[in-house]
Image (cartoon, rainbow, N blue to C red):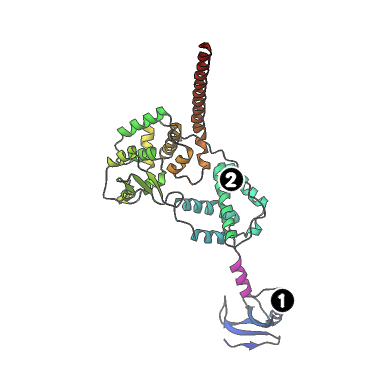
Amino acid sequence: MKRQRTDKPGVFYRIGKRIGGTGTEKIYYVVFKKDGKMYEEKVGRQYADQMTPARAAVLRSDFIEGRRITANKKKLQEKSRYTIDRLWEEYTKQRAQNANYNKDKNRYEKYVQPHFGKKEVHDIDPLSVDRVRLKYLKTHSPQTTKHILALLKRLINFGVKKSLCPPLPFAIEMPRVDNVKDDALSEGQLGALLKAIEEDDHPHAGDMILIALFTGIRRGSIFNLKWADIDFERGFITLRDPKSGKDDVIPLNTQARTVLENHIRTKSDYVFPGRDGKKRTNAQKSINKIKEAAGLPNETRPLHSMRHTFASLAVSSGEIDLYTLQRLTTHKTFAMLQRYAHLADKRIKQGGDAAGDAIERALKVKNDNIHTAETNK
């Protein structure tokens, strides 16, 4: 389209198809020089925007004086703006697509995005975060609310690390969570569960529970487990892409070996395959049937409880310390093992008492020998 001059300096128009009507209309542009650079900006249409040469001249003046920014500059500004939505996009590109990612994705879309998605970090203030925290504490557990705020904090920290945004000028207050809950089964419950497993006819459910009990591995690792990951010769199990996102290796003990050697094997690569031999994604129905037969409480999560039962019995034996347990259960931090510390404390106390008794016996023998020697003089 050819430029057409107007009576206003630096203002011209081109003829284009009319929007919202028939025929044509003028499309106005302005040309100006700023900081040694020439700019051409579209400012509006004759009918659609009710643009005139006089109005275009005012807009041209605004561009020159800096009261209005050019379209290119606006695009650059938008490109450099990192809202929480954009931080999430960048963050997900570098995240492993595992179970934890899916949980974070759900938390982000359901809880974080509605409140903070369109905001930049400098737009987030303590009051808005407090409102979100208090809102979800009314309808969700402290742990769930903590996960929501922790995700927001993680995204901002990611942005700071990648020089995409400034840090928050305040600390996000997290809900207090009492996570020390004993999910381990009692001796009686464990006996009832083992009996229910023996009487159950499902080809996989009982063995999944037993593997969780004898190894302490997580539900996701059980579903991921392939026959190629089990080294019967050397006595190890490789856990592929566990919760931490990094493969781990744990020992194959005698009890777990027996379960696996007697387990019904199919053509699938998976030890506990799902439909059509593919990776299993759920076992709730078949496992809950065993739970009910054993008379376990409704809140019991069998595979999860087996992991805690494994850890509790291991520490209570007095033969495994918390550091060894951390390796066996593949916890990446020591903090989550503190729930078992009281069991280790009991063994330590018993050891202290035994040491004291031994010292007392030694002192008694020594005193008896001294007394005998003095009597013989």
Indicate the quadrant where residue 218 lies. Answer: top left
Q: Position of residue 376 (x, y in %)?
A: 50, 11
Query: Gap in Å between the C-alphas at discs 1 and 2?
Result: 46 Å
Q: Which residues are magenta?
A: 57-81
Magenta-span inclusion, residue 70? yes
Q: Answer above or below: position of 108 versus 371.
A: below
**Kind of element beneath mark 1:** helix
Tell me, for residue 219, which label it has, or none: none
**Type of residue at label 2?**
Tyr
> How would you rate the neighbour count of disc 1 (Cα within 10 Å): few for under 14, some for 14-19, many for 20 or more?
few
**Kind of element beneath mark 2:** helix
Magenta-span inclusion, residue 98? no
Q: Position of residue 208 (x, y in %)?
A: 35, 41
Tell me, for residue 136, which label it has, or none: 2
Q: Answer above or below: position of 116 versus 79.
A: above
Q: Answer above or below: position of 61 versus 212.
A: below
Q: Position of residue 25 (x, y in %)?
A: 60, 82
